[in-house]
Every structure is written in C-alpha cells, then in structure tokens.
Image (tube, helix red, strand yellow):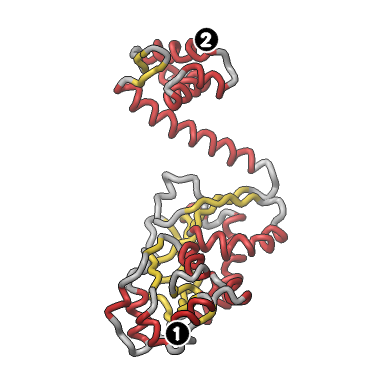
Amino acid sequence: MFRKTFLPPVADLLAFEAAARHTSVSRAAEELHLTQSAVSRQIRQLEEQLGMALFHRVRQRVVLTDAGRVYAADVRALLQQLSAATQKAMAFSSAGGLLNLAVLPTLGTRWLIPRLPGFMALYPDATVNFSARSEPFDFAQEPMDAAIHFGAPHWAGAVCEYLMHEQVLPVCSPHYRAQQGLRTPADLAGAVLLQQNTRPTQWTEWFERIGAPTPQALRGPRYEQFSMIAQAAVSGLGAALLPRFLIEGELASGALVALSTEVLTSSEAYYLVYPEARAQTPLVKAFRDWLLAQCAGIATAARPSL
C-alpha cells in the first residue's frame, strides 16, 4: 500500500529532473514546453512536500544540494522505469505482445536481426525490442524477457537453452594475405594478430591446435567486439579469429579470406536465457522455438567432439 504523502505529482518530478539535468530552470522549461514560472512553481511544490531545499539558486543557474543530488538520481531511474512500463503496457494492446530481448551486440547486428523477418512473418503482430548486453544481469532489476548469452549455462533464477557453440577460423583481407606472404597456417606467427578482449587466449589455443605454438599468440591490438575485429581485418590491419557464422557476408564477397581450414571450437557456448517465471509466456515460447530452429544446423556442426 502506497501512502499518498510520499508520492509527489509526476509533473513536479519531471520539472525537477529536467532542471537538475540542465542546471537551469529556463532550459527545463524549454524541454517541457512550459513557462519558466510554471517549472519554478512545480519545483517549489516538490520542495515544500519534501520539507527541504533541492537546489541552491546561484545567479542564473540552479545547483543541486547534497540531498537534491541523491534524490535526482533516484527520480531519474524511477521515471525511466515508469516510461518503460508504460511502453510495455501499450505494446500489449496488440494481439502479438511484446518481447524485450537483451543480445550480444555483434550477434544481434550481424546474425539475429537479418533473420528476424522470418520470425515477424510468423508473428506479424509481435513487437521485439532489442537492447545490447555483454554481461549477465538480474532479470528482476531489468525489463527484459530473455537474453542471448555466451559462456557457461549458469544464470541465477533463469533457464538456459543451448543454442550453439562458437567455431572460429583465421581470416584476413586478400591484400593483407598477399602483402604478408601468408601461405601456410604457421606463417600467421609473423602476422599482426587481432585480439578479442573477451577471448584473450583464443590465438594461443588455435596455434596449439595446429601444432605450432608461438609466444606471439598473445600479442596484437585488442578490440572490444567481434564487429570491430571484423572491420579491422577487412581494412587490412591484421589477421583475426572470427566465428564463421558472423562473417558469412565478408567470406561470400571476398572481403575476407580464410587462412586455414582448421577451426577452433569454443568450450563455452551461446544460450537463450529467460526467467523461470516467463517460461510459459506465449511469445517467449514462440521465440525460443524459432531461435532453436535457426541455430540447429550451426549447433550440429559446431558441437565439440567428446
């Protein structure tokens, strides 16, 4: 049960948050399409309700008090949650429902989104929202229905559905291969090796797999995402170990060429993760079934042998 005493009008909170963000009542008024006096009145009403000052008035600016700084951060987060909740409720006005999906950035951009028209053809009234996430998070604290995760099948309070392992192969641009004279896999030891931050030992493992371990395997410029490494390789900055399914376009066009048929299969894998409470949600189930079908061929080819 909420006590009305502790629930200020949303309009007052919006005025306060805008003024806090801009450190200006006049700029807050412009953003909210209100008069400056109206914004000042709403902030004054909020301060009276709280029984404290939220701003110091310094000439033409407003500066948050210590209490105002803490309150502004909390109010901003709550307004964002309220906005997300309202969008979610509005989306449910359609028969298809809403799916908020957290995805790994490169996987989402290069692989999942290009295939999404197939899902939308099956569920044309559905709305699928995408957010980029590279690390596990608490579903109870985030407005997400599901996530695609790379790692081990462990996520507190959630179901992990296996999608596929990751198979990487060494690639570079045709120009770089010719420039460096890369004729055999072992020649890569002398190349610039583009490194992926989240796979720091991948080149070491690959060289060990071909029987040519090298101390150079850990050296080379590091990149945060596969999309960055792919572009660096296309641009001739070095050789990269990249998942085949993420660079199908570059391999088909000739922008990248494979330097060996020897692939490295990851010990970790991709998983569809969703809270146990949403396991029976119709749209989550539909997306799960569709996604598993999309990954079936890749998963069969990439599973490591036991």
Residue 257 sits in which quadrant?
bottom right
Q: Is residue 262 above or below residue 227?
A: below
Q: Is residue 116 above or below residue 63?
A: below
Q: Position of residue 84 (x, y in %)?
A: 54, 39
Does residue 152 appear in this view?
Answer: no
Nearest the camera: 212 or 143?
212
Q: Position of residue 275 (x, y in %)?
A: 46, 54
Residue at 49% from the left image edge and 10% from the top image edge: 41
Does residue 266 appear in this view?
Answer: yes
Number of other residues with Cα within 10 Å of mark 1, as a class: few under 14, some 14 to 19, many 20 or more: some
Badge 2 marks a residue whose secondary structure is helix
Q: State which mark lies toward you, 1 or 2.
A: 1
Residue at 42% from the left image edge and 28% from the top image edge: 75
Tell me how many marks there are: 2
Q: Position of residue 162 (x, y in %)?
A: 48, 70
Q: What is the number of the mark on residue 100?
A: none
Which badge, 1 or 2, comes first in the chain's sequence?
2
Q: Position of residue 102 (x, y in %)?
A: 50, 54
What residue is shown with label 1? Answer: 182
* 122 horizontally vs 301: left or right: right
Nearest the camera: 271 or 220?
220
What residue is shown with label 2? Answer: 37
Badge 1 marks a residue whose secondary structure is loop
Amino acid at pointer 1? Leu
* 233 horizontally vs 137: left or right: right
* 202 horizontally vs 226: left or right: left
Quarter of the rendering occupied by the C terminus: bottom left
Quarter of the rendering occupied by the N terminus: top left
Amino acid at pointer 2? Ser
Could you give the CA–CA distance between mark 1 and mark 2, rounded to whole angstroms? 71 Å
Q: Is residue 293 above or below residue 19?
A: below
